[in-house]
Every structure is written in structure tokens, then in C-alpha cells.
Image: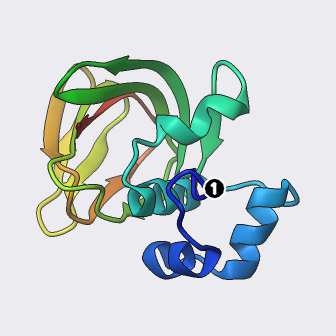
Amino acid sequence: MREEQEISLSELARRSKIGKGTLSELESGRRNPTLETLYALTTALKVPLSTALHDLGSPARISGHAVDAVLIERFEAAASVAETYRIRIRAGTEQESGAHTPGTTEHIIVLAGTARVGGVTDPVLIGPGMHGSWAADVRHLYQAPSGDVEALLIVRYPQ
């Protein structure tokens, strides 16, 4: 993706705040990315996360500090790309995600457990059977204050 956009390794490192050595190891297959790293890279490249997941097999599975995610579906329309993930937020953990591309929103339906999600300055508690949404073009968080959380997450990127 970097080469397709004619972006140097140094420039991608600057945009994503990921070290050049790490990027080189990722590109050569000597290192596996975390969810946080993939989000930093795809945001810097201005593409949806699922663009980077196509090589991980089906279903694509990725883990971060607090969140495990499985890409269930990617839907492309003229105005947006929507990704649907089955996620688990591990008990007692918190993951802060950087801002995605402008106009990106996230929507969650909690299946089990109670999640604290949303913008870092105004997260909300969402329990089983409840849903919520927030702007994802600002720093936002996922937290499981007590027990694992199972949920569906939809990330919508404008085209």
C-alpha cells in the first residue's frame, strides 16, 4: 500500500509515528503487527483497516492491547466503506485508539458484559443488548471494567 501511494518508508514512519525499523520488519514479514499498529498505518495511508487485513486469511483475526477482533464483513458503497467486526474486550483492560480518518464513525452492539467506549473525554457505559456510536476521528477508547465484553463493532469510513 505504501509503494502504491508512492510514499517513502521515512514519510510513512513520520505520518504513522511507527519506527522505520518496525515498518521494515513488517513489510518483510519478519514481524507481526498489532491492532494498534495496523490502525496507525492504515490511518496514515488514509485507507480502511480491512484494506490491510486481506492477506491475513479468512476470517482475518487481529489483536491489540485490550481488543481481539475478527473481521466479519467489508461492505463498499459509493459514499463509504463499512467494516463489521466481532470483538472481545478483555476484562480489566483499556485500549486507547488514535483518531481515524476524518468522518469515521464507530457503532457497537454489546452482546455480553459491560463496555466503556467512546471519545476519551466522554466515554459511556454500554451493557448487554445496548448499542452506542461515536466519532472515531478523535482519540477514543475501549474498556472492560469488569469481565470480558463480547460485541459487534461497525466502523464506517467515508469514501
At 52% from the left and 78% from the top, the residue drawn is 11
* SS assignment at label 1: loop
State the image coordinates of residue 158 (x, y, percent, origin top left): 20, 38
Q: Residues within 10 Å of mark 1 (few under 14, many from 20)?
A: some
At 68% from the left and 56% from the top, the residue drawn is 33
Residue 42 shown left or right of residue 29 in the figure = left
Task: Please determine whether, in this image, residue 28 is positioned above or below residue 69.
Answer: below
Residue 109 shows in the view: no
State the image coordinates of residue 97 (x, y, percent, origin top left): 38, 61
The answer to which image quadrant residue 81 occupies is top left
The answer to which image quadrant residue 24 occupies is bottom right
Colour convention: rainbow
Where does the C terminus fall, quadrant-wise?
top left
Q: Nearer the viewer, residue 115 or 76?
A: 76
Q: Nearer the viewer, residue 85 or 80?
A: 80
Task: Please determine whether, in this image, residue 102 is positioned above or below residue 107.
Answer: below
Residue 141 shown left or right of residue 1 in the figure = left
State the image coordinates of residue 88 (x, y, percent, origin top left): 50, 36
Residue 132 shown left or right of residue 90 in the figure = left
Residue 103 shown left or right of residue 88 in the figure = left
Task: Please determine whether, in this image, residue 52 is positioned above or below residue 111.
Answer: below
Q: Amino acid at mark 1?
A: Thr
Q: Which residue is mark 1?
A: 34
At 21% from the left and 57% from the top, the residue drawn is 137
State the image coordinates of residue 96 (x, y, percent, origin top left): 38, 64
At 63% from the left and 74% from the top, the residue drawn is 9
Q: Nearer the viewer, residue 91 or 87?
A: 87
Residue sitting at the far right: 30
Q: Nearer the viewer, residue 4 or 50?
A: 4
